[in-house]
């Protein structure tokens, strides 16, 4: 049996900049289905004789709900009985390539967006085969049959459950272009169904990477250079080796690892290592110098990301200039980075909470010198991802340690290792200069963004010929407002710190910059910030739609309790539109207190509205944590933060009430793991401006700047 | 050898007495429901009960458990309060990534065992040591109130 939906074989660029061929005969593996007592029309689903439907998902579940949303897409077109639907994590296989990335990986809010059509087709094809099987058994025309809740029903009232049709359905030809439902006929898509992964997440039974156990497993904790690019020049491991449970000390390019019978012995062993480090070229790295360097870069012109009209000759009566800054940020997933690897003679097996199974398969095949198809990737639950688990640093190091030791090795980062392990959201400085007419209305806007390049840092992308990193300018270069003369420049600056994708990527800082400056422009024009935006979103109806919905539901303009003020911001990212209104006051401790956030969302057709709402709420919490506390700073080349005492997290008492309203839409479904984050910070700081008259232009918010 | 009582069972483990309870549970006993988050009692992911009181197992040496009873997430469905809290967590579909939820549930059960009708302020105080990076705090609060209501019904 073959599947109509197997992505074509391809050669493509992989992480580490390696060009690799990657082929997997998925069809051969699927041929086993014929013999099994179940119906397996393609790689994505199985129907058992017991009526159980198993949806196999290649995407990583990191809290965003993809292990529920993808099964919903399949179940909808299959007309499955949702109560009989289960989810199973897929192996690494080309059949599970993310259609947007062309490799098996989860990120960029692409899951629903990229799988909306293919997963529905997978379900629809199976449904047509089940119908054909029933029609054959009844000797009737298939057109006289319908499906409902896991059964085929003939117009005469005859009914067969899918479980009774599995053998006959498996013999039907796979339809090439199965017919998809009209949205009006959806019974599962659009419903606030319960998540399939909740039961195992409330009793300790769900298995994360950290929970992997294997016979003979050693746990590794690694000492890494305290300065980026540093190297160990001498290692004295005699004290470490005396610790009970310590088995081996192994030096690899990434650092010096202590392998022991468990984490505690490995950690004690690591802490007992005496290592002399060569700090290398970044020994003098400091956040003050980085800030100065980025700020000075914005004084010059850069690579042009967008240019409309002529900012040079615009007739401006006045100018308004402001410099905004955002720091490096760590992802701080609740589960510190970890991976278990077992390298044997010509095979590698890894167990990890990873967002990048496909890239890992190729990278680790090179690390261990085995064929890519000899690398097996077991995807565990992810204790948070946020982009951090797209990186292969922990799987590479675990593989090297298993290869060197000959044992299965679980490499565990302590919280401090995780926090100081780089892969940060880039620091960034943006300078805005607006030309205003005599009435204070903006007629020209120049924007210069200085930041490191995520594209170059990724290992699988290159800066394009334009010299503009699209992640560096997203959220600024796509400014949706009607300003006739506009120019956005990108200035690449590389202080030497490994940067990476962080929830909502460039939008995470750029929307703070651009929406805050729009708030400044509204103030300069003497206009209400909501009305100012609304009047300039003529070419951006979906921005305008969410902006108006958020304002309406938040009661924009209506009275608030004494001391509470509103701010508003809107953003487009990853195909989705989100506006947020934040209600903020200054607490007795002088710190901002966010009471309520009202969000409006347009993400096209909605698969599961409850998951969409929770993702917006989650992104608000993540964004608020960053706005209030988030910063990774360097002194003498070293990261100054280490644990949650120095890199604080939002706590329950600080969590605002959140309301999420969803725009009804017929557009293609788009992702919601990230888009709720970008508007949060500028909405909060706009409210703080109303409250104090002080403009916050640098994150995290310094309460000292809010004092009169 | 250290003698322990975990979830009602007497056990013996061969570890140094300074080993945190967390690593005895996870590495020596294979009970991985209790999570490692920070190692410094700053995030609450490792919360277990010692004689019914919530403690951070990452920073409590196993020697401190001698003669006392350790209860973990794996035993919560056996108790009335634990069962009600887990049911409320399911009803509100609380977890996202889920990694912190063992600790959240352990803190919530300890709260409700000592305070059957907690106020919002009580919930803030009892739960402020448990970090959730996915931001499920509002759902946790709702689930605690729901569990409290179901227990007093």
Image (cartoon, rainbow, N blue to C red):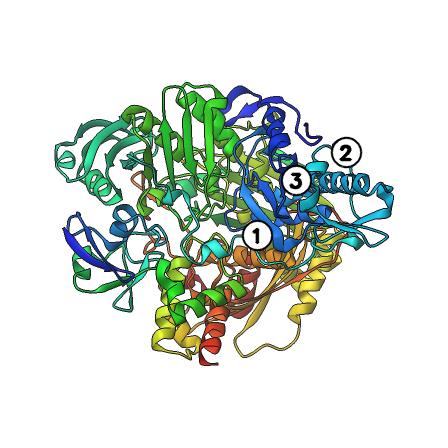
Q: Quadrant of the N terminus of chain A?
A: top right
Q: Is residue A310 left or right of residue A289?
A: right
Task: Give the camera-side residue of A292 and A336.
Answer: A336
Q: Is residue A225 left or right of residue B132?
A: left
Q: Dot 1, how many residues are within 10 Å of its Cα: few (below 14), some (14-19), or many (20+)? A: many
User: Quick one: label 2 or label 1, which is nearer the N terminus?
Assistant: 2
State yes or no: discs 3 and 1 in contact (Cβ < 8 Å): no
Q: CA distance from mark 3 to mark 1?
A: 22 Å
State yes or no: discs 2 and 1 in contact (Cβ < 8 Å): no
User: Quick one: label 3 or label 1, which is nearer the N terminus?
Assistant: 3
* Mark carried by residue A678: 1
| Local secondary structure at mark 3 | helix
* Mark carried by residue A283: none
B14 to A391, vertically: above or below: below
Task: State the residue position of label 2.
Answer: A175
Subunit bearing disc 2:
A
Identity of the residue drawn at 33% across and 32% down: A282
């Amino acid at each position: 049996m073959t599947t109509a939906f197997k992505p074509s074989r391809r050669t493509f660029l992989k992480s580490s900049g390696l060009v690799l061929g990657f082929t997997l005969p998925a069809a051969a593996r699927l041929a086993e289905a014929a013999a099994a007592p179940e119906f397996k029309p393609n790689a994505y689903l199985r129907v058992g004789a017991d009526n159980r439907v198993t949806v196999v998902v290649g995407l990583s579940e990191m809290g965003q709900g993809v292990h529920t949303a993808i099964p919903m897409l399949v179940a909808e077109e299959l007309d499955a009985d949702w109560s009989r639907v289960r989810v199973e994590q897929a192996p690494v296989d080309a059949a599970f390539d993310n259609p947007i990335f062309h490799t098996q990986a989860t990120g960029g809010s692409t899951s629903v967006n990229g799988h909306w059509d293919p997963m529905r087709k997978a379900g629809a094809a199976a449904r047509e085969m089940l119908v054909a099987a029933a029609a054959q058994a009844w000797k009737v025309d298939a057109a006289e049959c319908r499906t409902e809740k896991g059964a085929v029903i003939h117009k005469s009232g005859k009914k067969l459950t899918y479980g009774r049709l599995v053998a006959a359905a498996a013999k039907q030809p796979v339809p090439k272009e199965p017919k998809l439902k009209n949205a009006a006929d959806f019974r599962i898509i659009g419903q606030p169904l319960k998540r399939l992964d909740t039961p195992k997440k409330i009793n300790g039974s769900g298995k994360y990477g950290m929970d992997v156990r294997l016979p003979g497993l050693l746990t590794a904790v690694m000492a890494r250079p305290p300065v980026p690019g540093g190297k160990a020049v001498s290692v004295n491991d005699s004290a470490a080796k005396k610790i009970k449970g310590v088995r081996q000390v192994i030096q690899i390019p990434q650092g010096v690892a202590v392998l022991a019978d468990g984490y505690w012995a490995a950690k004690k062993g690591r802490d007992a290592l005496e290592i002399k480090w060569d700090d290398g070229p970044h020994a003098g790295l400091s956040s003050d110098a980085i800030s100065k360097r980025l700020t000075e870069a914005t004084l010059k012109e850069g690579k042009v990301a967008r240019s409309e009209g002529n900012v040079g000759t615009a007739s401006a009566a006045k100018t308004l200039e402001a410099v905004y800054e955002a720091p490096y940020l760590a992802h701080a997933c609740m589960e510190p980075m970890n991976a278990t690897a077992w390298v044997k003679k010509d095979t590698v097996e890894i167990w990890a909470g990873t967002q990048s199974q496909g890239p890992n398969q190729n990278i680790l095949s090179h690390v261990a010198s085995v064929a890519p198809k000899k690398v097996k990737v077991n995807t565990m639950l992810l204790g948070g991802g946020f982009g951090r688990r797209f990186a292969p640093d922990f799987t590479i190091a675990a593989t090297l340690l298993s290869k060197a030791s000959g044992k299965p090795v679980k490499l565990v980062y302590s919280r401090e290792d995780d926090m100081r392990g780089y892969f940060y959201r880039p620091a960034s400085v943006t300078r805005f200069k607006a030309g205003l007419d005599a009435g204070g209305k903006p007629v020209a806007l120049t924007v210069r963004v200085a930041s490191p390049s995520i594209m170059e840092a990724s290992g699988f992308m290159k800066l394009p010929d334009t010299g503009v990193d699209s992640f560096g300018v997203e959220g600024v270069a796509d400014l949706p407002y009607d300003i006739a003369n506009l120019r956005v420049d990108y200035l690449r600056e590389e202080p030497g710190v490994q940067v990476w994708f962080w929830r909502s990527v460039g939008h995470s800082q750029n929307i703070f910059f651009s929406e805050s400056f729009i708030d400044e422009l509204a103030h300069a024009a003497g206009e209400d910030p909501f009305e100012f935006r609304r009047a300039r979103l003529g070419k951006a109806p979906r921005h305008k739609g969410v902006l108006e919905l958020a304002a309406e539901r938040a009661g924009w303009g209506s009275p608030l309790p004494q001391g509470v003020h509103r701010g508003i911001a809107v953003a487009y990212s990853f195909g989705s539109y989100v506006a947020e209104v934040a209600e903020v006051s200054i607490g007795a401790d002088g710190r901002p207190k966010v009471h309520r956030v009202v969000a409006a969302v347009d993400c096209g057709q909605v698969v599961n509205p409850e998951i969409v709402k929770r993702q917006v709420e989650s992104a608000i919490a993540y964004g608020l944590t960053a706005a209030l506390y988030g910063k990774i700073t360097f002194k003498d080349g070293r990261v100054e933060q280490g644990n949650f005492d120095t890199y604080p997290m939002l706590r329950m008492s600080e969590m605002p009430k959140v309301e999420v309203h969803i725009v009804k839409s017929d557009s293609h479904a788009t992702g919601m793991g990230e888009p709720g984050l970008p508007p949060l910070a500028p909405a909060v700081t706009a409210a703080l401006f109303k409250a104090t008259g002080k403009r916050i232009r640098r994150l995290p918010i310094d309460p000292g700047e809010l004092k009169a | 050898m250290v003698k322990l009582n975990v979830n009602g069972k007497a056990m013996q483990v061969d570890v140094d007495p300074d080993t945190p309870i967390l690593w005895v549970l996870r590495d020596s006993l294979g009970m991985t429901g209790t999570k490692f988050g920070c190692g410094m009692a700053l995030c609450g992911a490792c919360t277990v009960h010692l004689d019914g009181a919530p403690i951070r197992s990452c920073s409590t040496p196993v020697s401190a458990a001698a003669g006392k009873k350790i209860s973990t997430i794996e035993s919560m469905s056996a108790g009335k309060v634990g069962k009600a809290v887990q049911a409320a967590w399911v009803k509100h579909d609380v977890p996202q990534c889920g990694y912190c939820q063992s600790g959240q549930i352990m803190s919530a059960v300890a709260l409700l065992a000592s305070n059957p009708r907690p106020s919002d302020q009580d919930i803030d105080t009892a739960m402020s040591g448990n970090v959730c990076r996915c931001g499920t705090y509002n759902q946790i609060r709702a689930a605690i109130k729901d569990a409290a209501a179901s227990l007093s019904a």
